[in-house]
Image: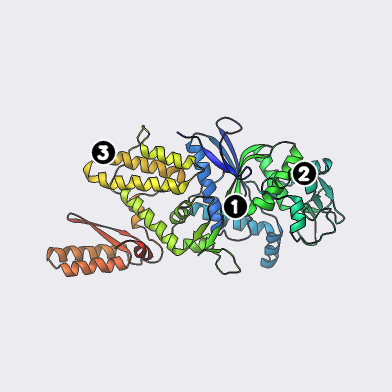
Amino acid sequence: MSALKIHNTLTKQKETFVPINKGEVSLYVCGMTVYDFCHIGHARVMVVFDVVSRYLKYLGYNVKYVRNITDIDDKIIARSVEAKEDFTQLTKRFTDEMHQDEASLNVLPPDLEPLATDSIDNIISMIEKLIANNNAYVGPNNDVYYSVESFENYGQLSGRKLDDMNAGERVDVDNNKRNPFDFVLWKSAKPEEPSWTSPWGQGRPGWHIECSAMATCCLGNHFDIHGGGMDLQFPHHENEIAQSEAATGERYVNTWMHNGFVRIDDEKMSKSLGNFFTVRDVLKKYRGEEIRFFVLSSHYRSPLNYSDEQLNESRSALERLYTALRDVKPIQNNLQSDYIRRFEEAMNDDFNSAKAISVMFECANELNKLKSLNPEQASLIAGDLLKMAGPLGLLNQSPEEFLQSSAGADSVISNDEIDVQINQRLQAKEDKNWALADQIRDALKEQGIILEDKGAETTWRRVNVATLATQPQ
């Protein structure tokens, strides 16, 4: 099997993955700031790095996956004031909502999920080291700032140079800073805001230092993989590297991974544009597995264009995979098949889930052909299909459960009503009233019910009506 290669944002190239400790992988991902419901961009981060963790385990690694929760920042404070709700209650409520969304998307919980507010002592300790090393200073306003000029390699992740940024970017003047690009490590308390005691007075941490403290506390000063959305590359992850390496004197992370943006109908997702969708909104029309499949149908570094058409195609694709598995008893094959080999080659090429899924469809096509010709071989092929689905977190339901479950709000007809109409159609066929039989079949199809005749037996499954429009006639 080919070695796993990962595109490293730091080096701008694919590199053969070699863990720091043999057989073990340390993985940190920037999690959510919990002041609102998760949106589709959050869903992509959740699913992408869930698959990274699952596939590393599939390869036999012992994975320690850490994803933090930011439960104190400016947005949280503003929302708690607006809602007239204590910030701890607000963040607890939206953390619970986030976990519910994760469960709907079949995202496994990380091994550790540290809170920023539980890490204050570690944050203060790291800031003290930075001040002692002359990498940070206390400003006239009693805020503590990181001095970007003190870190020689600042800009290495994003490719930005301080001289170029100073010359080419407009930055708000802040007389408390020595350099306009210096960033805050500790904010002095404002009236009525949450605060903690520190050597610099009452205050709270800046956003960037929170992740450095939580990551190094959970995984050590030097770990394997750090992930997050592409929007975090600068300044958040750039600042993480600077403050972490200055505080510890060690390399912070070996491999940096960033997933691409989500676009809505080819436009950037934005609340101001009115094209902002929460996971909850989308779950009203589509199942969690359909959203998950949609996310994985594109390479994680590529832009992902959200539209109903794309989600409908994902629904249709899952229906084809589940239909292939129907009426087959899967058997796990101890020998590596060509399908498994090519699936692993795709995933070992920077977690190329889109290519891996195309191998799954080839497998499903052969499975459909072998069902009646060679049931024993079909069972082995079905086992391969489920083995490939495992690290992607797909095909967890029984085919019958998925195909007969309600696909959104399109189908309102009950199971009993369907059975009545099927019996009426069978009677019409017995009476050789083919026109009536076809009429019943077509009427059910308009309601999202697909009938399938196998000899004298008729089975049925539900689909979304919009899905039918994307299928060839």
Foreground tag (1 vs 3) = 1
In this view, the mark in front (3 or 2): 2
Quarter of the picture holding the C terminus: bottom left
Secondary structure at badge 2 equals loop
Mark closer to the chain start, 1 or 3? 1
Q: Is residue 100 visible?
A: no
10 Å crowding of disc 3: few (<14), some (14-19), many (20+):
some
**Nearest-to-viewer mark from 2 and 1:** 2
Residue 253 drawn at (x, y percent): 65, 40
Quickly name the residue at label 2: 151
Amino acid at dot 1: Gly
Residue beneath disc 3: 376
Which is nearer the N-term, disc 3 or disc 2? Answer: 2
User: Is residue 375 visible in the rendered structure shown here?
Assistant: yes
Vertically, is 326 above or below 448?
A: above
Q: Which residue is mark 1?
A: 229
Along the horizontal axis of the image, is 97 left or right of 418?
Answer: right
- Element under label 3? helix
